[in-house]
Image (spheres, coloured by chain):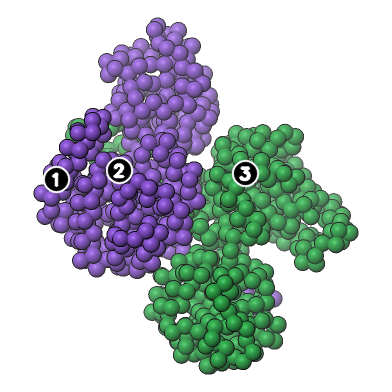
Chain colours: A green, B purple
Amino acid sequence: MPDTGTVKEIAAAAKADSFLLAALDAGTRDGALKAIAAALAENSAAIIAANEADLKDAVDQNLPGPIVKRLKFDAGKLADVIAGIEDLIRLPDPIGRRLSRRQLDKGLVLEQVTCPIGVIGVIFESRPDALVQIASLCLKSGNCAVLKGGSEAKKTNKALYDVIYAAGLASGLPAGFLSLLETRDEISALLTCHESIDLIIPRGSNEFVRYIMDHSDIPVMGHSDGICHVYVDAAADIEKAVPIIRDSKTQYAAACNAVETVLVHEAVSEKLLRPLEEELSAKGVLIRGCPLTMNILAGVRPADESAFRTEYLDFIVNIKVVKDLDEAIDHINRYGSHHTDSIITEDKAAAEKFMQRVDSAGVYQNCSTRFADGFRYGLGAEVGISTGKLHARGPVGLEGLQTYKYRLYGSGQIVEDYAEGRSTFHFQEL
Amino acid sequence: MPDTGTVKEIAAAAKADSFLLAALDAGTRDGALKAIAAALAENSAAIIAANEADLKDAVDQNLPGPIVKRLKFDAGKLADVIAGIEDLIRLPDPIGRRLSRRQLDKGLVLEQVTCPIGVIGVIFESRPDALVQIASLCLKSGNCAVLKGGSEAKKTNKALYDVIYAAGLASGLPAGFLSLLETRDEISALLTCHESIDLIIPRGSNEFVRYIMDHSDIPVMGHSDGICHVYVDAAADIEKAVPIIRDSKTQYAAACNAVETVLVHEAVSEKLLRPLEEELSAKGVLIRGCPLTMNILAGVRPADESAFRTEYLDFIVNIKVVKDLDEAIDHINRYGSHHTDSIITEDKAAAEKFMQRVDSAGVYQNCSTRFADGFRYGLGAEVGISTGKLHARGPVGLEGLQTYKYRLYGSGQIVEDYAEGRSTFHFQEL
């Protein structure tokens, strides 16, 4: 890496090399991934030692328990990321996929072909496994990456980066394929590199992601809020509804795809709410409810307007009784964050209506919102989850790291001939 | 339309109705397009009278000739836009196209399905045909549209809008399917409606587009500069090169896809430059050249760094001699605007290298850059041309007005079972 130099120089070097990386064949990129996996295994002792040093610093600095937990990168985590790279190698090459091919006229053929986006800037939180996942996804998809990890994981990130970088370089990748920024003030410099960086992917707290979105003219892909819903329809199977809601709330409450509000059709509220309360209370979940919910469940605290707009990321859930499917859909489109919403119903028509009208990246029937994840979608892994509607939506894997270009193959054609009627277009899909 | 009310209310009404429009079947949307085409034909006298009033105002106000020319909307133009709607009706429905389908596990199926983006705000220049094209593209693609046309065409736009709106409403479209803003200060209000407007498409001068991009937190699709190149390779057929360059420069010099800089391999510079100068001079094109060009062509003015970054939109072209294909590619990626660039060569390997490494929405071989256009690409029509790399790239038609959502059909699955090893994923493409 251009590991000396300003952020602008690092980004410009990545840009220049992005054209070379994009032009490498799949064999070279997959070969580099194999070499990286092997190098990570060989250097496990140094990586784990670096992580132990980070862990010691975290404990010395009295960092909160959950941060220390996420920071831990042991032999098991290393084996996981190596297995992830091996999975990625087996996925088909996303570059050069022909999306369409059309003859415009004799000897004039238009092709729409996928290609890498260019240079991706990724700013991520404390988990060091993110560095390996992001670096390998960007490499497989032919994009240069400029990374900035959390300061708590500084030593682990540097150790992982050094191993990946050396193995990649030895495999014939261009020098700018991967760069690591190491100080916090480099983030604001990165946000101004719109000539070199094509896309920023921030991964972190809501406030952090919103800060990035507000402070860059570079396109940003990701999500700030994750306000997800489960709607229990009149035709729901209550036996399915209760465990799905429990899982959506408690399987990992701090995740963006955890449920924050449960909507319940009035026809099943009496039947559902008591067993649901029992299940959730056993897990330590605090319920906030609408007036109708409070009529059924004594001792529940009220959920007001602001509650419905809150991403708790905690063992708290809102419950609201609605009079029909339409009210549920309206509520989700108004208060949700267009992330992931699930309907529990055995009624196929209700499910279709929900899936069509709910304006979210993921619309589910009869399963937990926690499935919104690149690995669970079979995408290999993800660089992030997008709630934007342009470009990639939902979990973003290899496909979301591609754009396309139009290639037009002619044999001397000029527009004047078509404008003046000497030639006419003969469109034909090939 | 909510034709009274603030811009915020108009946008919110469009948002609410966007879910209804998106849910209409293709027959209803195509039926509305048919009714709109018929209504435009029936009301031709009123539309043309409104245009004559606009033309009279334009002449009274001494507006420049080219503006008056673009403003004209006569029986021929009306027939063209009606034919355009009929073409659009024949195109397949872009909504609900299944992009992928994957079983994650038994009874857990993930589908990636196209759906409309939602509400599109389009701000366009004086040509009234743009209003009809944009309105019909948005309708076919299931998007509500909020339009703001140029003030010179105010009466024509209102007449066209009234006819289209009434015909659409009578065909069962929701009231918010199409709105027209009529005053200039409504543009800045529109740019703040990020809760209701999903995408802004500006069509106009560079300064105008850049203003919109800088003043909205809503995603903007389009392009400001169009700095396009033709590169004449060592293996070029000079007989093709000269007319292609003439066409790329002069067929419509004010278009974004007109060429601004011609790059010439040194091996063919002696052979190409003199006939090229003859052809271009005959059309009144002024040449600015690099030192090597000036050695061959006496009397050419110098092209400096800033010339290579200028979009002339006029009968001026830069010519630069390069030593090889690599220098040409580097020049294009450095000075170009990632719009459309063409290589003239009979060497297949050179063409492939150019097409892969040039970082533009359109990369051509042996044809004019002027082909970069939605109609010429067979897309039906275009709402604009995008030089952004995220989402749609190049001319944007129906496909670019779609996003997708993931639908996950389950039968009670929860993530806990997978996290704790009681279930495992069995990915299978369906």
At 29% from the left and 17% from the top, the residue drawn is B284
Q: Chain of mark 3?
A: A
* Left or right: where A318 falls relative to B339: right
Task: Please identify the quarter of the rendering in which residue A88 is found.
Answer: bottom right
Q: Chain of mark 2?
A: B
Q: Nearer the viewer, residue B128 or A429?
A: B128
Q: Indicate the amino acid at tag 2.
A: Gly
Discs 1 and 2 carry the same chain letter: yes
At 55% from the left and 58% from the top, the residue drawn is A386
Question: Where residue B166 sits in the image (x, y, percent)?
Answer: 20, 61
Q: Indicate the amino acid at tag 3.
A: Leu
Question: Where residue B334 sits in the image (x, y, percent)?
Answer: 53, 30
Q: Residues within 10 Å of mark 1 (few under 14, many from 20)?
A: many
Q: Are circles 1 and 3 on residues that touch, CB within 8 Å?
A: no
Question: Where residue A263 sits in the image (x, y, percent)?
Answer: 51, 80
Residue position for label 2: B150
Numbered mark located on residue B48 in the image: 1
Labels 1 and 2: the sequence-earlier one: 1
The kind of secondary structure element at disc 1 is helix
At 38% from the left and 79% from the top, the residue drawn is A349
Q: Nearer the viewer, residue A354 or A218?
A: A218
Residue position for label 3: A191
Q: Indicate the amino acid at tag 1.
A: Ile
Numbered mark located on residue A314 in the image: none
The kind of secondary structure element at disc 3 is helix
Whole-number angstrom distance, CA of label 1 to CA of label 3: 50 Å
The quadrant the N terminus of chain A occupies is top right
At 13% from the left and 50% from the top, the residue drawn is B46
**Does residue A367 appear in this view?**
no
Task: Using the image, determine if residue B62 lies above or below residue A346.
Answer: above
Question: Where residue A385 sits in the image (x, y, percent)?
Answer: 58, 60
